[in-house]
Amino acid sequence: MILYFTGTGNSKFVADYLSEKLEDNVISLNNVIKNNENLICKSEKPYIIVAPIYAWRLPAVVEETIKKAQLNGCKSVYCIVTMGENSGNADKYICKIISDKGMNFTGYIGVAMQNNYLFMEKMPHPRDASKALKTIIPKLDKIAVAIKKNECLEKDDKTAFAALMSGVVNKGFNKFMLKNQQLKADNDCISCGKCVQLCPVNNIEIADDKPTFKGNCCGCLACLHHCPKQAINVKNQTQDKGRYVCPEYSDWKIK
């Protein structure tokens, strides 16, 4: 069973690719979180968690969802993260969560993909972003083969001051940066409601024909990247950075 969380599609791409290679089912953690459900599932195959890295850890909402989840059947759990350059000590945190559930943590590995954190860099042209996906396919194939053989996955990225980055820095990111970022929709907004639909934590609602933000952002930035008019921004920080949405695997593979 493949459990994925995504903001702009990177982790969904990986989850769908592995689903095809492993002939396994996928569950969207976005839907579980959005509907305020407790995840209860059963799998005869290993569980595979696919999620992005936010400030050198899995998103806090993902960690909390996995802590509460009832994962029945197979006791083996893999974790595959989509990331920019590195993932800090994210593996140690998710390993503890899995071990505390009485399950076997059978490996963790990162897959470097397009960084969608708009504050850091401009986003690529969609054509270039699509071409770049070819570079991760060999690694995904190796991951699939290893999982089929029930082999452990080995983390292969390193982060300077990993304990600090995944500890104090991550806590600061969740406590201060996410709570204080000034999300706002400008006059280009067409009130389509896509941001409301995609927000996994129900942080957005439409009021007076404009999105309003409740201060409960989880950092996925789906609202910014998926807005058809690029009308949502973080004040004075994202207006000229472009946007990024990973192609759907089913569409990408037939091109």
Image: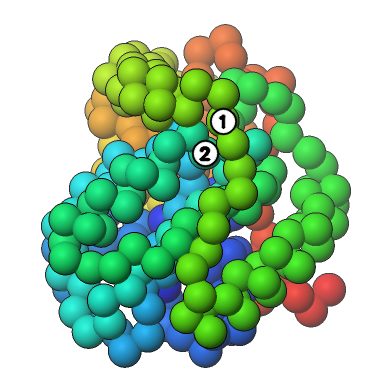
Q: How is the image coloured?
A: rainbow
- Residue at 54% x, 51% y: name it: 155
- At 68% across and 43% down in the image, what residue appears? 114
Q: Nearer the viewer, residue 106 or 178?
A: 106
In the visual, does 188 lie left or right of 42? Answer: right
Residue 77 — which label? none
Indicate the quadrant containing the C terminus: top left, top right, bottom left or bottom right.
bottom right
| Mark-to-mark CA distance, 1 and 2 | 7 Å
Measured as percent of width and height from the top left, residue 232 is found at: 52, 29
Q: Secondary structure at mark 2?
A: loop
Query: Would residue 193 be seen by someone viewing this image from the given angle?
Result: no
Q: Residue at x 73, y 60 (%)?
A: 136
- Pick the residue in front: 132 or 240: 132
167 over 92 or under it: above or below: above
Residue 92 picture quarter = top left
Q: Which label is found at residue 87?
A: 2
Give the label on residue 159, or none. 1
Q: Is residue 200 above or below residue 41?
A: above
In x, y percent, where is residue 231? 56, 30
Quarter location, residue 83: top right
At label 2, which amino acid type do we have? Ser
Sequence-earlier tag: 1 or 2: 2
